[in-house]
Amino acid sequence: MINIISDMDGVIYRGNNLIPGAKEFIYNLLENNIPFIFLTNNAEQTPIDLQRKLQSLGVDGLKPEHFFTAAQATAIFLHTQKEKGTAYVIGTGGLVSELYNVGYSIDENNPDYVVVGKTAAFNYDMLKKAVSLINKGARFIGANPDITDPAPNGELIPAVGPILSAIETATGKKPYIVGKPNPVMMSIAKNKISAHSADTVMIGDRMDTDILGGLGAGMKTCLVLSGVTTQEMLKEFPYRPNFVFNSVADIDLERLEKIN
C-alpha cells in the first residue's frame, strides 16, 4: 500500500483558505485507510492547533497524530543530542511547547542552544541576544530554512530564513537546520506511520524543501503548483519530481502507487 507524507501550507491551504479539492483529498485518504502524515515546516503551531485549524476550515476526522511539525522534529533532535538541555528560543509558543515536552528548559543567559523559528515579533534585541549567546558558545539551530511563506492573498511573506540570515551574518556561523529538507525530519515522519521509503510519496509545493527532502530520503515525489513553485521555476532546479500537478485535486493516488 502507498503511504503519503504531505506538506500543508501551499498544498492543503494557503493562509486561512482551504485549497479547492484538499478536503476531498484528505477524506479519500481517511476513507481508504491510506497511512499518511502532514509534515510541515511550520514551527509556530502544535499538532492540536493544526487539527483545529483544519476543522475550522471544514475538515473533520483528523487527529493530532496526523501532524508532525518542524518544532516537534527540532525538539526530538535536540533531545537525542543532549537530554534535558537548555535553549534560548526565538519563535512562538508552539516551538517552546515542544521543547518543554522533551524536558528542555529556557535559558537566556547560558543556553546549550539558540533555537530559531519564524516569529513576527523578531526584533533587534532578540538579534543582539542570539548573536551574543552564539559567540559565547551556544550552538545555532534553525527549525526550518524557508525564506518565504505563501499568504492568503497570494503574496509571499518573509519566513524564518531572513531571521537565520541576520544571525548568521552577525556571527559568521551557519545554523543546523532540522526541518525539511533534512532527512532527520523525513525519517522521524516515516517511522510515525511505519512507512518504508520505496512505498512512500512526498507531496509538496517547494522544490528546495519538500521535493529535495523526499528525494534525499529515497521517497517518490509529487509537486503541486498551488503554493510557491510555478511551472516556469522548475527549470531552475537540477532535479525533478516524479509527478507535477496543479493541486491535490488532480492527484490520482492509484497512479502515484504505480511510480517506479
Image (cartoon, rainbow, N blue to C red):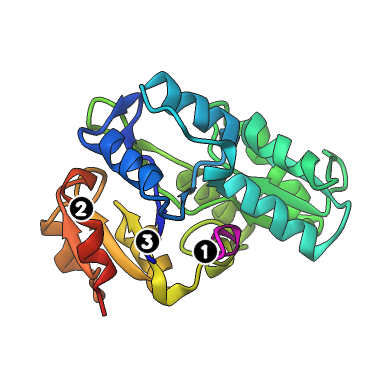
Query: Alpha-carbon distance for marks 3 and 2?
Result: 12 Å
Is 59 one of the magenta-colored residues?
Answer: no
The segment highlighted magenta reads 188-194
Provide the residue designation for mark 3: 202
Residue displayed at 58% across by 37% down = 64
Q: Earlier in the sequence, mark 3 or mark 2?
A: 3
Residue 26 is left or right of residue 61, and the answer is left
Q: For the residues labelled 3 and 1, say whether their Cβ atoms are less than 8 Å apart.
A: yes
Tell me the number on the disc at residue 79.
none
- Above or below residue 228? Residue 223 is below
Which amino acid does the dot numbered 2 rest on?
Ile
Q: For the residues labelled 1 and 2, say whether their Cβ atoms are less than 8 Å apart.
A: no
Tell me the number on the disc at residue 251.
2
Q: Earlier in the sequence, mark 3 or mark 1?
A: 1
Query: Alpha-carbon distance for marks 1 and 2?
Result: 21 Å
Which amino acid does the dot numbered 1 rest on?
Met
Report if residue 220 is visible in the image.
yes
Q: Residues within 10 Å of mark 2 (few under 14, many from 20)?
A: some
Compare residues 83 and 256 and report the one nearer the observer. 256
Residue 23 is left or right of residue 46, and the answer is left
Looking at the rendered image, the disc whose residue lies closer to the viewer, 3 or 2, is 2
Quarter of the N terminus within the rendering: bottom left
Secondary structure type for disc 3:
strand
Residue 20 sits in quarter: top left
Provide the residue designation for mark 1: 186
Q: Residues within 10 Å of mark 3 (few under 14, many from 20)?
A: many
